[in-house]
């Protein structure tokens, strides 16, 4: 049995937006988070108030931005999207806040990367809906207080430990988004295949669900790439053979590890005798940014049990040795 497309084929330019769930019923997984959010939203509606400020954290691609969109749709309000690194100066934040309307949602992705000055400026905005700006310099300096419309701030971060305690405490509710189950991922792939108008066999769905790092964004990316292989190397249908061909070409193994993942594990094993190794030394060895390892690669390696994080550094587990085909810590392989 196969899943066949039922809607018109979307263009590449709009495909990510098209695949994004448009209502609660289409958002698969994260049931505990959804249940709590529905209570918060319905309670706010009954009181005719704005919901509390919300904070989402978890690995990239788990649906933090999508949840913000769905909350805005449920509240029938506007949403403004930005990211921490884009708010460089107090003026940038002031422009965002003063352009909001009553009841709007302001979504700040990677909120842990807000500058210290902007973070301090946002405290009274979250608590009292006021903006305190300094005008002038020296003895002529004075504080200008601007009243803001009541809004809901939704923050998202992949590194919650980097959020200061004062900022964290100002959110009314904090939710962790976890990696998805295999069954939920299969449902997501089936839905996306229908939207893309591509036919896919159950075996191919199984292959993708085992190699997508338990992450919807990765599952959709792999589905789109396999669609390309199906069109060029096959008859347009994503089946087992096409899945095998595609994953081999992309260098993705049975656990969903890519070459960068394997490079990190090999570096720990061969350059540092299995660890422990500090994150700075590891990043320098494999030629990756520290943040990239911490946000992209490490969470999945930890989830699989291939990597262990200790106070002294990272350690490759026995499972990592087995997966890479290295028999012992003294084995030597080319890196």
Image (tube, rainbow, N blue to C red):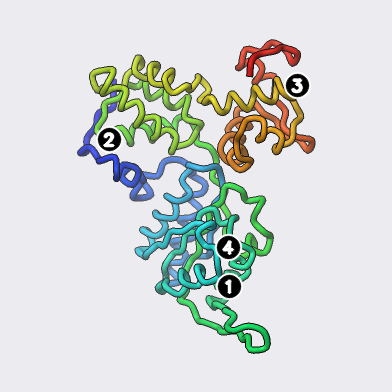
The crowd level at tag 2 (other Cα within 10 Å; few <14, some 14-19, many 20+) is: many
Say what secondary structure mark 3 lies in: loop
User: Which residue is labeled 4 in the image?
Assistant: 172
Pointer 3 residue: 273
Q: Secondary structure at mark 2?
A: helix
Disc 1: which residue: 127
The residue located at (47%, 25%) in the rendering is 211
| Residue depth check, mark 1 versus mark 4: number of the one nearer the observer | 1
Of marks 2 and 1, the one in the foreground? 2
Tell me the quarter of the picture where residue 280 sits: top right
Cα separation, mark 1 vs mark 4, equals 11 Å
Q: Work out how far the residue at label 2 is from the one at label 1, CA to CA, in angstroms.
A: 44 Å
Residue sitting at x 59%, y 74%: 124
Within 10 Å of disc 4 (Cα), the crowding (few <14, some 14-19, many 20+) is few
- What is the C-alpha distance between the residues marked 3 and 1? 51 Å
The span from disc 3 to disc 4 (Cα, nearest Å) is 45 Å
Residue visible at 58% across and 33% down in the picture: 300
Mark 3 vs 4: CB contact within 8 A:
no
Tell me the residue that label 2 is attached to. 196
Side of 143 where 107 appears, left or right: left
Marks 2 and 1: CB-CB under 8 Å? no
Identity of the residue furthest to the left in this view: 8
Where is residue 115? Give x, y as percent. 61, 62
Residue nearest the observer in this picture, 74 or 170: 170
For marks 3 and 1, give the one nearer the viewer.
Answer: 3
Q: Is 186 or 48 nearer to us in this picture?
A: 186
Q: Nearer the viewer, mark 3 or mark 4?
A: 3
Q: Position of residue 175 (x, y in %)?
A: 56, 51
């Amino acid at each position: 049995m196969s899943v066949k497309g039922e809607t018109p084929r979307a263009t590449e330019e709009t495909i990510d937006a098209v695949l994004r769930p448009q209502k609660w019923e289409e958002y698969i997984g994260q049931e505990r988070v959804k249940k709590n959010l529905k209570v918060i939203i319905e309670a706010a509606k009954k009181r005719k108030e704005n919901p509390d400020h919300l904070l989402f954290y978890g690995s990239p691609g788990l649906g933090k931005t999508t949840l913000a969109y769905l909350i805005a749709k449920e509240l029938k309000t506007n949403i403004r999207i930005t990211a921490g690194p884009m708010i460089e100066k107090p003026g940038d934040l002031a422009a965002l806040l003063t352009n909001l309307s009553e009841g709007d949602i302001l979504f700040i992705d990677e909120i842990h990367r807000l500058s210290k000055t902007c973070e301090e400026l946002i405290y009274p905005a979250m608590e009292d809906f006021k903006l305190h700006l300094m005008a002038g310099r020296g003895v002529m300096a004075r504080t200008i207080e601007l009243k803001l419309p009541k809004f809901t701030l939704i923050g998202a971060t992949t590194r919650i430990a980097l959020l200061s305690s004062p900022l964290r405490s100002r959110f009314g509710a904090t939710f962790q988004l976890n990696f998805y189950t295999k069954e939920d991922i299969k449902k997501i792939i089936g839905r996306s295949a229908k939207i893309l108008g591509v036919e896919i066999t159950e075996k191919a769905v199984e292959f993708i669900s085992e190699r997508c790092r338990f992450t919807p964004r990765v599952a959709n990316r792999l589905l789109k790439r396999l669609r390309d292989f199906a069109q060029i190397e096959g008859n347009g249908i994503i089946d087992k053979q096409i899945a095998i061909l595609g994953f081999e070409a992309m260098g993705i193994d049975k656990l969903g590890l890519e070459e960068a993942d394997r490079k990190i594990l090999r570096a720990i094993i061969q350059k540092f005798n299995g660890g422990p190794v500090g994150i700075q030394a590891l990043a320098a060895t494999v030629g990756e940014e520290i943040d990239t390892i911490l946000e992209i690669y490490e969470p999945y390696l930890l989830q699989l049990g291939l990597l262990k994080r200790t106070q002294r550094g990272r350690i490759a587990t026995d499972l990592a040795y087995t997966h890479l085909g290295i028999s012992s810590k003294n084995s030597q392989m080319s890196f």
